Structures are given as C-alpha cells and as structure tokens.
Image (cartoon, coloured by chain):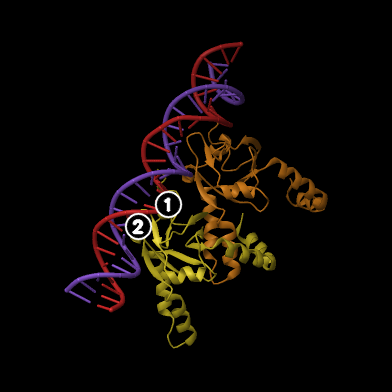
Chain colours: A yellow, B orange, C red, D purple
Amino acid sequence: MTKTLNQNTFTGEFSYSLDSKGRLNIPAKFRNVLSKKNKDSFVITKGMDPCIWVYPLVAWQNIEDELKKLSSLSRVNRSFVRSTVRYTSTVKYDKQGRIAITQNLIDYAKLKKDVLIIGMVNKIELWNPKLLSDAEKEFHEIKSSEFDELANQIIL
Amino acid sequence: MTKTLNQNTFTGEFSYSLDSKGRLNIPAKFRNVLSKKNKDSFVITKGMDPCIWVYPLVAWQNIEDELKKLSSLSRVNRSFVRSTVRYTSTVKYDKQGRIAITQNLIDYAKLKKDVLIIGMVNKIELWNPKLLSDAEKEFHEIKSSEFDELANQIIL
DNA sequence: ATAGATTATGGGTAGATGTGGTTAATTATC
DNA sequence: GATAATTAACCACATCTACCCATAATCTAT
C-alpha cells in the first residue's frame, strides 16, 4: 500500500498503449496522487509542443480563471483562447483508470499505438515517442548553453 | 549507541549489487541518517554525469519547487523540465532497505550487476564502476588545473 | 571469542495494474 | 419514433509489483 508517496506531483515516464477505441491508461502512480476533489477526472488539452497536456481537474480551474481575465478586445487574446479551448475537454477515467482521448487531439499529437506518458510536475504530457525524440534531439543541439544555465540555478 | 551521529549527509563508498528485479540496497549508514520526514523514501533521478542521483525526499522538494516556478510558455523551460523530470521518481525502500531502480535510469547509467554507491554529501550517486573510472581518468587529464583552484578555495 | 543483532541478497506470493473485449446506455440519424 | 452509431460501463485475464519470509554474511557488545 503506497498511499501517500508523492504529493500531487507527476514525475517519471511510462510507455503505454492507445487502444482501438482511443482509450489510454493513466499510470496508477499518477491517479493515486490526486485528491477526491478531482472527481476521477482530468482535463486534456493541446500542448505547446506537439503533444497533449493532461491536467488534474482542480489545476485546470486555475488556468481557466486566467483565461477569463484576458480581455476579448484584443484579437491576439481571442485567437489564443479559441485555439486552446477548442481542443479542451474534461474526461473521467473508467474503472480501469483509462481516459478517452478526443480525435482532434490524437490528430494534433499524431498519436499511434505506442504513447509515451511523461510526468511534468504539475501536468502530464502524452507523446508520440518518435516526435519527442526528433524534437529533443534538434532542440538540444541549439540550446544546450541555456540548459546548463538553468541546471546551475536549480539543481543541487 | 550511535543513532544521531551524522546529520543527513552521505559520505563513503559501497559496492552493492543490483538484483534480477532491479532492486538495489541502500547502505544502512545512509538510511539511518535520515529524518522521519523522508518517509522511508528517496528520489532517484538522472545525474549530470552518466550516473544516477539519489536525493532524500525532503531535499528533492526544494528542487521541485524551483521547477514549478518555470513558466511553460518558454520552450527552453519545457524542454529542461522534461529532460530531468522524466527520469525522476519517488521510491520507498522495502523492509530490507532496497529501492527499485526504474529501467530508464538503469539504461541511462548503464548499470549492470555491480553498482558503486558513493556518498556525495547531500545526495548519493550510483555508478557503473567501469564508467566512473573511465570518466575520472579522462577528466583529470584535462582539468587538473581547475582542481587545484577549487582546492585553494575550499580546503582547510 | 562468542552470542546476538544487524545487514545484504535471493526468492515466493497475493494483490494491484495494464490491456483487450463484451454488453448496456446514450446519442444521433432518418 | 425506430434504428443505427457512438459512447460509457462492465467483465476477464495476463503481467507486474509491493510485500513477506528465509538465509548468509557482517558487525557489536560483553
């Protein structure tokens, strides 16, 4: 019984599979970390990278509050809100712990059968493994100096 | 009775073995040093050298807090968080004092059966002995001058 | 030195977990 | 409103993991 291990944060990576019905299991370690207030639900949305972002329900509320503050007078704001929210939905996981991924997100992240699930502290990312390795390889070549700088600030 | 000798620091090296289930014993001297707040848990993550870093749970919280502050709007931040946290997990040790090492870390540090466990003051390093001696040999040849400089700053 | 305690290592097992498939319920379409 | 199509709830099973016990080696204290 490992009930109170992590405290509401997601870490680690898992290689799970998207089944023929578009269902994906969320790692038990991730589900077990969440409070009752999340009502067995996540919010899935478009990531800023070519992946899917998965938030605990209560964490998403805060983001939504921020979105509400953005003035609709600005066209940039309107476009930004529209582009994220149209991909956003609340999904409850079934008795086995799986969520149903919407088709537009599957298309956006180009998910096939094998899905890489990555804990990103306060959210979860869903990746096509191929897309991630391509992106990271290319990116790290360019930005390794900024990486080192961040590491020096943060890692002990 | 030497119960409260050291205060949460790790020194010395040990040669232990990774068993067929991916479990590794943490030296009793290291475990006995930790406060109750660590809940019999460590956080294992990717080291900056080709080894595994093991933090006491409470020490890792501070790093995680810093990671939480990084805005996801920056691509460098996202990539940095991902590159560290995907290798990170909280592991509780069993009644015999062993922790389970995740496969991605075993791969990263190229751990085989023999593992060198090194106390690094505020954290613990897990090495493939071969990789460590190679790395140190190569490094000393190049950087011995910087070693001397550090020695002048620090040594008593 | 010797007995007792602690520690490192190996293995077994019950319960938890991941995955596929089937049935019931809901929604959509004509 | 009847029927098809889609979604959600349920069941089954293989795999894996956390937890337990056993044993040998090492350390500690008298």
Work out whether residue B122 can be spotted: no
**Residue D8's x, y, as percent?**
31, 62
C16 versus A134 height, above or below: above
Q: Image check: C29 left or right of A17?
A: left
Q: Nearer the viewer, residue D9 or B39?
A: D9
Q: Which residue is mark 1?
A: A28
Identity of the residue drawn at 55% across and 56% down: B86
Give the mark nearest the N terminus, 2 or 1. 1
A54 versus C13 height, above or below: below
Name the image quarter holding the C terminus of chain A. Answer: bottom right
Secondary structure, mark 2, is loop
Q: How crowded is the residue under tag 1: few (<14 C-alpha within 10 Å), some, or many (20+)?
A: few
Residue type, mark 1 in image:
Ala
**Residue B116's x, y, as percent?**
66, 39
Identity of the residue drawn at 49% across and 84% down: A76
Q: Image check: C29 left or right of C6?
A: left
Q: Nearer the viewer, residue A28 or B142?
A: A28
Disc 2 and disc 1 on one polypeptide chain: yes
Q: Chain of mark 1?
A: A
Q: Do residues under tags 2 and 1 come within 8 Å of each other at their CB atoms? A: no
Work out whether residue B42 can be spotted: yes
**Residue D30's x, y, as percent?**
53, 16
Q: Residue B17's mark?
A: none
Q: Nearer the viewer, residue C8 or C20?
A: C20
Q: Image check: B152 left or right of A33?
A: right
Residue type, mark 2 in image:
Asp
Identity of the residue drawn at 43% across and 64% down: A55
Query: Which corner quadrant of the image does residue B101 belong to?
Result: top right
Q: Residue A94's mark?
A: 2
Q: Chain of mark 2?
A: A
